[in-house]
Image (cartoon, rainbow, N blue to C red):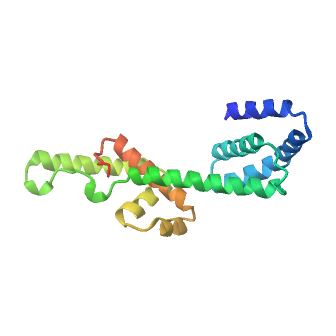
Amino acid sequence: MAVAVDRMRELQHSAGGVANQRMADVFRGLQAPLRAFLVQQCRSRDDAEDLVQEIFLRLWRKGAPLEIRSFKAFAFKMAWNLVKDRSRRAHTRMISSTVRPEELQFSDMGEGEPSGMVESIQMLGLVAETLAKLRPSTREAFLLYRMEESPRTEIAAQMGISVSMVEKHVSQATAALRNAGVQCPVR
């Protein structure tokens, strides 16, 4: 992020022509509204700041095409497209790392071997302990998605969050289980 900010400052200092002055004015006028919009969409100030910088760097690289009548509309459309792209990438990462409950590998408790039973109980304890350490919203989204097999859209509506946030919660919970040593095969 600091590199992007430094780059924007360099570009502002090098602004000499009318087009560059127009871009500097657009930047000053749209920076705060774009950031507010992106914070609302991303739920992260850091991500929003990164996206604002990305938008203005892209606009600056394009120059100031005369065919763009409304930089505000163009910038907000670009912001919306970047949010959708990030959501798609997050969804793809989440899908590649999800684990269905039946894929968790526990020792069979029906075998009757005391060591197998102890291992299974320890693994269940590890899963419960790991899930208990998660933020309540992450745990809720994971349990609804993995245990109750609720669709992401329903979970999002129930929890009052976006579908991409549901995907992030599920991905975080899956990663926490893997980090705790629960064997989670990749599909």
Q: How many marks?
A: 0
Identify which residue is drawn at 70% across, 34% down.
4
Task: Name the quadrant of the N terminus.
Answer: top right
Residue 12 image point, x, y percent: 83, 34
Viewer-nearest residue: 137 or 8: 8
Identify which residue is drawn at 68% across, 52% down.
39
In the figure, is residue 77 to the left or right of 187? right
Compared to 71, does 180 lie above or below? Answer: above
**Quick one: which residue is furthest to the left in this view?**
112
In the figure, is residue 58 to the left or right of 19? left
Can residue 68 be seen here? The reply is yes
Identify which residue is drawn at 52% across, 65% down.
156
Residue 24 image point, x, y percent: 85, 41
Viewer-nearest residue: 91 or 99: 91
Viewer-nearest residue: 30 or 125: 30
Viewer-nearest residue: 83 or 169: 83
Can residue 42 be seen here? The reply is no
**Quick one: which residue is furthest to the right in this view?**
18
- Identify the image quadrant of residue 57: top right
Residue 176 image point, x, y percent: 40, 45
Identify which residue is drawn at 75% across, 43% down.
62
Residue 58 image point, x, y percent: 71, 43
In the figure, is residue 37 to the left or right of 118? right
